[in-house]
Image (tube, grey):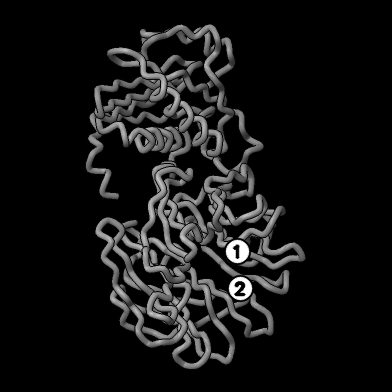
Amino acid sequence: MSRLRYLIPICLIVLVLATAANAQYLEVTAPGNQTVRLAVARPVPLTGTSHAATAQELADVFAFDLTLAGPFTVMPAPPADTGTGVRSGEFSFAPWQSAGADLLLKAGYSVSGTSLVVECRLFDVVKQREMAVKRFTGNTRDLRWMAHSISDEVLRVVTGKKGPFTGKIAFVSTATGNKEIYLMDYDGRNVQRLTKNRAINLTPDFSPNGRELIYTSYQKGTPDLYRRDIATGVETRLTTNRSTNIGGAWSPDGNAIALSMSTSGNAELYLLNRDGKQTAKLTSSPAIDISPTWAPDNRQLAFVSDRLGKPQLFIMNKEGLEVRRLTTNGNYNVSPRWSPNGDRIVYCRQTGEGFQIFAINPDGTGDIQLTFTGSNEHPRWSPDGRFITFSSTRSGKAAIYVMRADGQSQTEVMRSTSNNTHPAWSP
């Protein structure tokens, strides 16, 4: 995003503890292994006077991100904590050791007008050793981005893989009475409207570099695929064939777009280049073929077809060959999305109470249900494969939720008086 130019990382030190105890931190999606007690200290001023609102917002972001993350039991500061600094020697480890903390996140800040400095340090409490330090200088409006970035780094140090918390979620909202596309932080903050065409806009999908979106729009009367530069707002119409063009999905290398088009009379799958030129026709059958999704190796696609009578999931190679059925349970399976890790495909199944979200291995094994309440649709992975965002009607109107990949910690992040659907998490 363009706002990143305001952030100037001054110091970044990352040291991962190479101990047997640290190995248990590597599994993020298994909440039953929450043996790591992470204490989050009250943020303190680095210089000058305290700023209660800044301290509280930093603490709130850390608590939300790291509680959702999975491998931690997040602890508040113990009453005995009287340390006023964030560096070793400026506070005592004793209160944290007595409280049973394994790790300690100390945060400091400095506010001067609209200028903000945030410094965080992660410590191993048992060994009283600093694991990482990260410092930002920027604008006060970037406070939440800084805090999310620190949460990302905590996950990277503890698990070996950076967190997704600085990412954005694009989604469709009926707030204006039309279905327009919006952008927000993953936790529902800083919402901004992208499209203003007063038409139906659906299925946003981020380019691999996160700078562009493709989506289907009815702004010219028929459903066409559009590409939009997020920073500039420049929009390009990619299909002009006056047929149904839906479900565009970027290839992992960014060189192709798979989508369903009805130019031949029924919905078939095609490949386009980023400028909309057709490069291949992948399917050719009397069936309806829709909702393509790429494997992260760029070699296979999963998709939906009713070629056996009811919508089911299938997999083929990127040449449209070696087609095989994936799902065998349920009579109506749709909306597949391949995990960035390549090991799981999430999808929706119609049940007696609407749609529920399931996940399955690419070989057809391990088919499990993740949601059980309300009607849940449009699942999309976070870029690290740890989380899934989706829409759910469990609270009434369709709202945007986030959960861990195993279905745990289902958390509402965007609710309003409108319906909010079709979320997509940025790289």
Q: Are marks 2 and 1 in contact (CB under 8 Å)?
A: yes
Q: Is residue 314 left or right of residue 199?
A: right
Q: Is residue 280 above or below residue 237?
A: below
Q: Is residue 299 visible?
A: no
Q: Is residue 179 left or right of residue 193?
A: right
- Decide if residue 19 is on the left or right side of residue 70: left
Q: At 53% across and 81% down in the image, what residue appears?
A: 322
Reading the image, the residue beneath label 2 is: 313
Indicate whether 306 appears above or below 286: above
Location of residue 166 (image quadrant): top left
Mark 2 is surrounded, within 10 Å at the Cα level, by few (under 14), some (14 to 19) or many (20 or more) other residues, namely many
Numbered disc 2: secondary structure? strand
**Which residue is drawn at the image coordinates 48% and 17% (left, top)?**
125
Residue appearing at x 72%, y 69% in the figure = 329
Residue 319: percent from the left, percent from the top?
43, 81
Residue 137 in sight here: yes
The residue furthest right is: 352
Position above or below: 128 against 323: above
Q: CA distance from mark 2 to mark 1?
A: 9 Å
Q: Horizontal and vertical percent for residue 387?
A: 53, 49
Q: Residue at x 55, y 41 (%)?
A: 28
**Tally of numbered discs:** 2
Give the residue type at disc 2: Leu
Q: Which residue type carries mark 1? A: Tyr
Q: In the figure, is residue 53 to the left or right of 235?
A: right
318 up-or-down from 3: above or below: below
Q: Which mark is residue 347?
A: 1
Q: Callout 1: 10 Å neighbours few (<14), some, many (20+)?
A: many
- The residue lying toward the viewer, choosing from 18 and 173, is 173
Q: Residue 154 in the image: state x and y as whole percent.
A: 43, 32
**198 or 239, which is in the foreground?**
198
